[in-house]
Image (cartoon, rainbow, N blue to C red):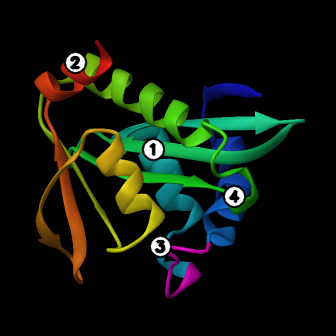
Amino acid sequence: MIYREATTSDIPQIQIVRHTVKENTLSDPALVTDADCEEFVTQRGKGWVCEIEEEIVGFSIVDLKEHNIWALFLRPEFEGKGIGKELHRLMMDWYFDQTKEKVWLGTAPNTKAEKFYELQGWKNVGRVNKGEVKFEMNYEDWVNKCR
């Protein structure tokens, strides 16, 4: 297993991972374009991937402009192996090295993702978008969780 920063050449495999998920699926795959991915990885923030045998099985992307988690996804067959937790840690450590601003995310209610973020110490602060659960994490809570 290799964890590394995402590059623009990873976008085709990132898109494959994004479209294989069973929860938090896109109603229209065209909603997240390759150009969107490139902007988030190169201009708005940074991304990370996990590779197994040169195949990307998971990725995470954080957005410094809007202070939110833009994406954290795994291929379903790789869930429960600690990959998501490590991608989350890499992303959060980098984010709070860049800024101490609170970060937020939205995810569908009653999903594995909702439980995952609760276990990582995120605070449920209500709803966002079309009924997604809105979570927030501040710097102090992240530092305390990591101790």
Q: Position of residue 145 (x, y in %)?
A: 26, 24
Q: Say above or below: 91 vs 40.
A: above
Q: Which residue is mark 1?
A: 61
Q: Quadrant of residue 140?
A: top left
- What is the CA distance from the residue labelled 2 to the residue labelled 3? 28 Å
- What is the CA distance from the residue labelled 2 to the residue labelled 4? 29 Å
Q: Position of residue 115 (x, y in %)?
A: 38, 57
Q: Amino acid at mark 1?
A: Ile
Q: Which residue is mark 4?
A: 75
- Residue bounds of the magenta highlight: 22-29
Position of 47 with respect to 140 (left or right) is right
Which secondary structure lies at badge 3?
loop
Q: Which residue is mark 2?
A: 143
Q: Quadrant of the N terminus?
A: top right
**Of the residues under marks 1 and 2, which one precedes in the sequence?**
1
Magenta stretch: includes residue 114: no
Q: Name the mark nearer the viewer: 3 or 1.
A: 3
Prevailing secondary structure of the magenta residues: loop
Q: Name the mark nearer the viewer: 1 or 2.
A: 2
**Of the residues under marks 3 and 1, which one precedes in the sequence?**
3
Which secondary structure lies at badge 2?
helix
Q: Badge 3: how crowded within 10 Å, few (<14), some, or many (20+)?
A: some
Position of 114 with respect to 15 (left or right) is left
Could you say which disc has been placed on residue 24 in the image?
Answer: 3
**Of the residues under marks 3 and 4, which one precedes in the sequence?**
3
Q: Report the residue at 50% width, 79% height from top.
A: 26
Q: Amino acid at mark 4?
A: Arg
